[in-house]
Amino acid sequence: MSGRSSTHIMLSVWKALLLREATFRLFGTRAAWAWLLLEPLSHFAFLTFLFAIVRQRVVGGIDVAIWLILGLIGFFTFRRTANQMGGAIDSNLALFTYRQVLPFDAIVVRGVLEGLIMLVAFILVTLVMALIGYDVVPDRPLMVLGGFFGLWLLGGSLGLAVAVGGVIVEETRQIFSMLMMPLYFISGVIFPLSAVPPQYREILMLNPVVHGVEAMRAGFSTYYHASDGLDLSYLYLCALCLLALGLTLYTRFAKAIETT
């Protein structure tokens, strides 16, 4: 009987890692699955309350609740994917004693799992909003998915670079964590970019996360007044550049990573 091919072994490893990670993330602690939804929902509740105080029900031509949830889901998809992949090596050191399991496997599986979790979370939140009376059928669903997938890819590419960078320079993950909070505020998640003066808006549009968030909103409703300069190809270009950087770093420091 011939032995298994390297591809077959890799897919088997990915399947086992995916089941392991999914079990831990969803059932590792009491009601662990609920906490995955609580973070974006708590932000959503607080921000909705603030907009209610100022009596603003429409942003950019769409309902403020829809506007907020699209921005929050998009940003948290990016951030959680980057964060989970960035910590994959440190969290799976014991598994690397098995020669079939490589650090790259753990990183990729975490990214795939986080993307699936956030997609399910997006669908669940959308269904809940539909039940309470919101029109949640997007006008251009492919554009919404394009923005969502682009943000996931950007987060995954950044997460790969952070995971490898953390082996080379220990402070990489701390720097990454510090940057997430200001990025949250400058990505158009909680305030409309139309309120920003044009000269500063051009600077904010250099942030690829903005393009993913705005694309999800523009895809949801053709009435949405998207920011000038919205370009999904820019988001994907940045994601691919980061992916190339991460793969280059991994290839260059593969031995150091595998002997961590």
Image (cartoon, rainbow, N blue to C red):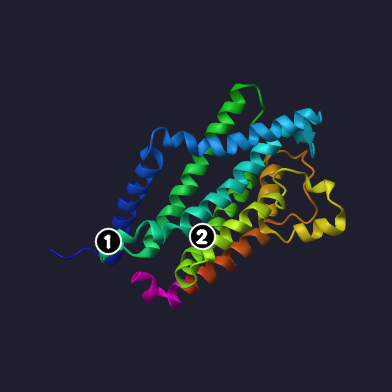
User: Which of the numbered marks, if any, corresponds to residue 159?
Assistant: 2
Label 1 is placed on what type of residue? Answer: Ile
Position of the N terminus by quadrant: bottom left
Q: Decide: few, some or many residues near mark 1? Use Cα within 10 Å; few <14, some 14-19, many ≥20.
A: some
The residue at the point 26 percent across, 64 percent down is 97
Q: Is residue 94 above or below residue 120?
A: below
What is the C-alpha distance between the residues marked 2 and 1?
Answer: 24 Å
The residue at the point 83 percent across, 50 percent down is 196
Q: Earlier in the sequence, mark 2 or mark 1?
A: 1
Q: Is residue 206 left or right of residue 236?
A: right
Residue 81 magenta: no
Q: Is residue 49 above or below residue 115?
A: above
Location of mark 1 (residue) = 9
Residue 117: image location, x then y, percent: 47, 43
The residue at the point 49 percent across, 39 percent down is 36
Please identify the residue farthest to the top as the structure is shown. 132
Label 2 is placed on what type of residue? Answer: Gly
Please identify the residue farthest to the bottom as the structure is shown. 252
Residue 201: image location, x then y, percent: 81, 56
Q: Main secondary structure of the magenta part?
A: helix
Q: Is residue 125 left or right of residue 52?
A: left
The residue at the point 38 percent across, 56 percent down is 91
Residue 187: image location, x then y, percent: 70, 51
| Of 55 and 232, the residue lying toward us | 55
Q: Is residue 33 above or below residue 21?
A: above
Which corner quadrant of the image does residue 56 belong to? top right
What range is drawn magenta here?
250-260
